[in-house]
Amino acid sequence: MELLATSPASIQRAIGILRGGGIVIHATETCYGIACDMTNVQAVERLFAIKKRPADKPVSALFGSIDAAKKYLIFSDAALQLARAHLPGPLTIILPLKPDATQIYPVPSRLSPGSVGLRISSHPTAMAIAEGCARPISTTSANIHGQPETYSYADILA
């Protein structure tokens, strides 16, 4: 595992790792998150294995902007109004996938099949990674499933 201080170079490194099918841990406005390219089935499977997360417990998708999310998700007028008022920020909006967006999120939500939780982070690092990756990335806490969320590097190592 590499530990990199936040910088333009480390953000570019994280983007390259994600695009190459790897996993990264990054800061968010809530806790540390673990991310992968949600269009890469092997990366999503590896993320679920690392977290020991049951396959029927979906993770949300992090996008760089509402416009980026519109390429994959269907927004009702109410959802768009909610997104514009509260995103970026610590809010998840469950939205249906567009019919042609089947390449995203190979683990379907048991709560709402054919949908995904939309996140747009207000944290500058998470936002830069999501914008630079230019595809949906997973966003879930960087912890083992069912364990406390991580708020420091020491938490992640533990």
Image: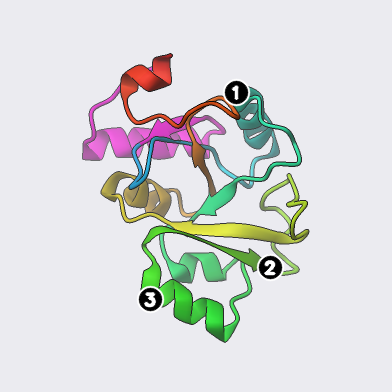
Question: Height in image: 85 above or below 10?
Answer: below
The residues colored magenta run 1-26
In this picture the colour scheme is rainbow
Tell us which disc is closer to us: 3 or 1.
3
Disc nearest the viewer among 2 and 3 = 3
Q: Where is residue 26 in the image (x, y as percent from the top left)?
A: 37, 35
Q: Do the residues labelled 1 and 2 touch (CB within 8 Å)?
A: no
The verdict on residue 20 being magenta is yes
Task: Assess disc 3: are there few (<14), some (14-19) or many (≥20) residues with their C-alpha within 10 Å of its C-alpha.
Answer: few
Residue at the far bottom in the pictured view = 77
Mark 1: amino acid: Ile
The residue that disc 1 covers is: 50
Residue positioned 66% across, 53% down in the render: 104
Residue type beneath disc 3:
Ala
Residue name at image x 34 percent, y 31 percent: 151
Q: Gap in Å between the C-alphas at discs 3 and 1?
A: 34 Å
Where residue 98 appears, as percent x and y from the top left, is 69, 69
Give the alpha-carbon distance from disc 2 to disc 3, as whole Å. Answer: 20 Å
The answer to whether residue 50 is visible is yes
State the residue position of label 3: 85
The residue at which mark 2 appears reads as 96
